[in-house]
């Protein structure tokens, strides 16, 4: 029998109205109360749309696409590519409705949207962007994903690591080679002669930040075992926004430790870094080389054009759409690694002769 809203309320020790407020969102609910309700929903297997449980084996033509920030070009390109590839032109299948859900990078919002999509009997779900590396969230996400995939609705994890799931579920994982891309970018800077390389990493606790920073440090260690430690004071974490890059560069300058190159967590951050350096009268790349990551469309048009690492966003979106609609079979093991590519442009050059370490 379907679990009722009243049963969830009793299990959580709150009123049915409070459960409704938590599920519908947009209403003020104390954090502890919200947590109890969400746990009760998970433990009882409640689906907000009651008829959906009776039709659990059926799915709709709706495909949910979860992104961190649809205004960010990285996610905009991914979501747009998924939606375009869902167009049935040339395929003997009905049109799919892509519903883009903007989570703001919030783990709670991610679970909430998955719950809503489950209630709508979504025909498939694509989760994009780095994963928050918190054991509690990973367990909750895995449980929710397993329930959705258990109804036969495919789930694609795009740009994030695989989840601990039972075998046999229609879940595919598309992994970007962030580690390899960051490694090659650092190698490029080292080959140019840079040894004092600053690194503006993404937010801590995010899979993308960890992979890119790990690749960067691995390249430094391979070149010189002590170089990674020597550059550690020039490494700091920041957000993925332009303002975060600007503030990070100002902080690096404030610390007074010399550097000849800055590798940024993404292209947007790199533009903020470049702005802060220019504000202090530093030329790019004559005084400081700057590099980004992702190869967003504006990179070729910045002055100078930005050296970066190309992430195959459009290809990933197309592949995710094919997997979530069943037009392409899930590969053995469920994981596909998509290669990244170093794009060398004018924003990187050898360090000034007087500052080169011999």
Image (cartoon, rainbow, N blue to C red):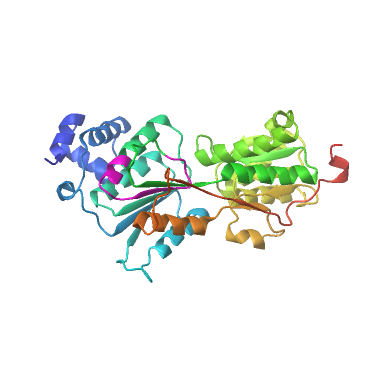
Residue 136 image position (x, y, % from top left)? 38, 30
Say above or below: 328 vs 24: below
Residue 279 image position (x, y, % from top left)? 72, 50
Residue 42 image position (x, y, % from top left)? 26, 35
Pick the residue in front: 237 or 251: 237
The reply, left or right, for residue 62 in relation to residue 201 is left
The residue drawn where x is 66% and y is 39% is: 199
Residue 49 is inside the magenta segment: no
Pick the residue in front: 180 or 345: 180
Residue 155 is inside the magenta segment: yes
Say above or below: 69 vs 297: above
The residue sitting at the left extreme is 1
Which quadrant of the view contains residue 224?
A: top right
Pick the residue in front: 21 or 260: 260
Residue 21 image position (x, y, % from top left)? 24, 42
The residue drawn where x is 62% and y is 35% is: 236
Bounds of the magenta segment: 146-162
Quarter of the image where the N terminus is located: top left
The residue sitting at the front extreme is 332
Total of numbered circles in the picture? 0
The reply, left or right, for residue 71 in relation to residue 22 is right
Quarter of the image where the C terminus is located: top right
The residue drawn where x is 28% and y is 37% is: 29
């Amino acid at each position: 029998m379907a679990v009722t809203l009243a049963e969830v309320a009793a299990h959580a020790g709150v009123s049915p109205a409070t459960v409704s407020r938590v599920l519908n969102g947009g209403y003020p609910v104390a954090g502890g109360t919200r947590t109890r309700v969400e746990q009760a929903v998970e433990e009882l297997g409640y689906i907000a749309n009651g008829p959906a449980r009776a039709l659990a084996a059926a799915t709709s033509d709706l495909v949910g696409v979860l992104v961190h920030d649809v205004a960010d070009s990285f996610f905009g390109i991914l979501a747009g590519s998924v939606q375009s590839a869902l167009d049935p032109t040339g395929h003997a299948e009905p049109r799919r409705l892509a519903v883009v859900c903007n989570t703001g990078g919030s783990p709670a919002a991610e679970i909430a949207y998955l719950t809503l999509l489950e209630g709508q009997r979504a025909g498939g779900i694509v989760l994009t962007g780095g994963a928050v590396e918190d054991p509690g969230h990973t367990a909750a996400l895995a449980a929710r994903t397993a329930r959705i995939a258990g109804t036969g609705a495919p789930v694609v994890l795009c740009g994030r690591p695989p989840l601990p799931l039972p075998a046999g579920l229609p879940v595919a994982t598309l992994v970007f080679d962030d580690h390899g891309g960051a490694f090659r970018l650092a190698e490029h800077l080292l080959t140019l002669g840079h040894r004092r390389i600053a690194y503006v990493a993404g937010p801590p606790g995010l899979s993308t930040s960890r992979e890119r920073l790990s690749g960067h440090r691995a390249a430094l260690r391979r070149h010189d075992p002590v170089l990674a430690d020597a550059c550690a004071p020039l490494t700091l974490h920041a957000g993925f926004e332009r303002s975060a890059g600007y503030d990070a560069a100002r902080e690096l300058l404030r610390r007074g430790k010399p550097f000849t190159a800055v590798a940024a967590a993404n292209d947007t951050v790199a533009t903020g870094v470049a702005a802060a350096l220019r504000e202090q009268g530093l030329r790019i790349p004559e005084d400081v080389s700057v590099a980004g990551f992702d190869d967003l469309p504006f990179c070729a048009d910045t002055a100078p054009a930005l050296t970066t690492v190309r992430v195959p966003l459009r290809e990933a979106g197309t592949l995710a759409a094919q997997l979530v609609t069943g037009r392409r079979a899930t590969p053995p093991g469920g994981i596909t690694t998509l290669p990244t590519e170093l794009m060398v442009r004018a924003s990187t050059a050898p360090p000034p002769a007087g500052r080169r370490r011999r």
